[in-house]
Image (cartoon, rainbow, N blue to C red):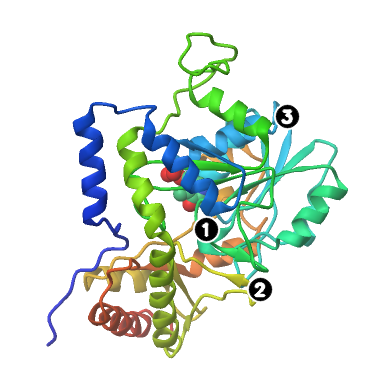
Amino acid sequence: MKKQMKIPLAKPYIGEEEVTEVTKVVKSGWLSIGPYLKKFEEGAAKFAGTKYAVAVNSGTSGLHLCVKAAGIKQGDEVITSPFSFIASSNPIIFEGGKPVFVDVDEKTYNMRPELIEEAITEKTKAILPVHIFGQSCEMDEIMKIAEEHDLKVIEDACESIGATYKGKKVGTFGESAVFAFYPNKQMTTGEGGVIVTDSEKVTKLSRSYRNQGRGEVEEWLDHVRIGYNFRMDEMSAAVGTVQMKRLPWMIKERQRIAETYNKKLGKIDGVITPHTAPHNTNTWFVYTIRVDEGINRDKAMEYLNKNGVASKPYFPSLHLQPIYKELLPYKEGDFPVSEAISKSILALPFFITLTNEEIEYVTEKVGEAVNSASKK
Ligand SMILES: *Cc1c(COP(=O)(O)O)cnc(C)c1O
């Protein structure tokens, strides 16, 4: 019998240069609001292709500030996706707004523009598209609807830094957008996020809100609004500055591994590999497969786990989360496509130092898992 491997779901790529830079910061004693923050923001804006970038302590904080800067208030409705991580819709609720979900596309798992139009009411203030798993939403259609109905667009690009739609990068479509840098994302700062935008107003407001509501002179104890402490520290910014430089290469490596998985896993009966729309480039936040109806997903995951292959059911649909069932008027059956994806999907080990031997092992175990979890 072949030896058993143990392969985690995700692993950040940290090189010597990150260690060097972070050591410099720690030794300098300048640990917050310093030169690395500025450098990191410049790098982020340059990468995204936006005028401004505002770094914060998480993607969630970034989205919160974008929702705030968009003027979302008590009772306002924001149209978004139920197939996502809860951090995409919670910020709407932080501000007293209401997430209005629309169902997603069966292949890309992104929200369907046709359904957005139907969900618009006179309370609708914004659309918050979530570019899921590294792939852009249908931005031409979404931007057209937003223009026609005078709605703001806030892009949750937390999973899709570097992804393009018809050659244009995500993060450059809406009024504002956010990238996130938790250790399982395409690049990391430990915890962290960044708002990218061309809007001077969003930039000024976000800078103020992240720094206790200070006025224009940020060091001054002159508080002009109720703000937060959402600042990114210098250690994170130092790691991020190096990671941002590595990002184009890290994305290429993710694409290479995803293609290898696609080829190998695509041959297994009962496994549905991910679909990238032809006009999109995917930067692969996670690598997920779906199993077809004849296979018990949870049993397959159990088999994988027992054999040292980590997996996770990314994502359960948001409208069925216990707290959302309490707060929002949704129930099972409301978003059948999102629900069907949630029931059949699983994420597999995916990081750029994954070896060929490990990919081979995962493939073999997925094949065995699917067989052993057949409902027939
Ligand atoms: C990761 C993520 C976020 C932000 O998460 P943080 O952990 O706060 O950085 C937001 N939305 C989506 C869809 C995400 O995957």
Spatial separation of the CA atoms under disc 3 and disc 1? 29 Å
Q: What numbered label is drawn on residue 48?
A: none
Between marks 3 and 2 in the image, the one whose residue lies nearer the viewer: 2
Q: Which residue does the numbered mark 3 point to in the structure image? A: 75
- Residue 271 position, x and y percent, is 46, 82
Q: Residue furthest top?
A: 221
**Of the pair 216 and 287, the residue shown nearer to us:** 216
Q: Quadrant of residue 372?
A: bottom left
Residue type at the position of mark 1: Ser
Residue type at the position of mark 3: Gly
**Of the pair 56 and 317, the residue shown nearer to us:** 56
Spatial separation of the CA atoms under disc 3 and disc 2? 36 Å
Secondary structure beneath dot 1 equals loop
Q: What numbered label is drawn on residue 279?
A: 2
Q: Say above or below: 232 vs 110.
A: above
Q: Is residue 134 left or right of residue 349?
A: right
Q: Which residue does the numbered mark 1 point to in the structure image? A: 160
Say which quadrant the C terminus sits in.
Answer: bottom left
Q: Is residue 101 left or right of residue 214?
A: right
Secondary structure beneath dot 2 equals loop
- Residue 196 position, x and y percent, is 57, 44
- Residue 163 position, x and y percent, is 55, 63
**Of the pair 153 and 123, the residue shown nearer to us:** 153
The answer to whether the residues at label 3 and label 1 have Cβ atoms under 8 Å apart is no
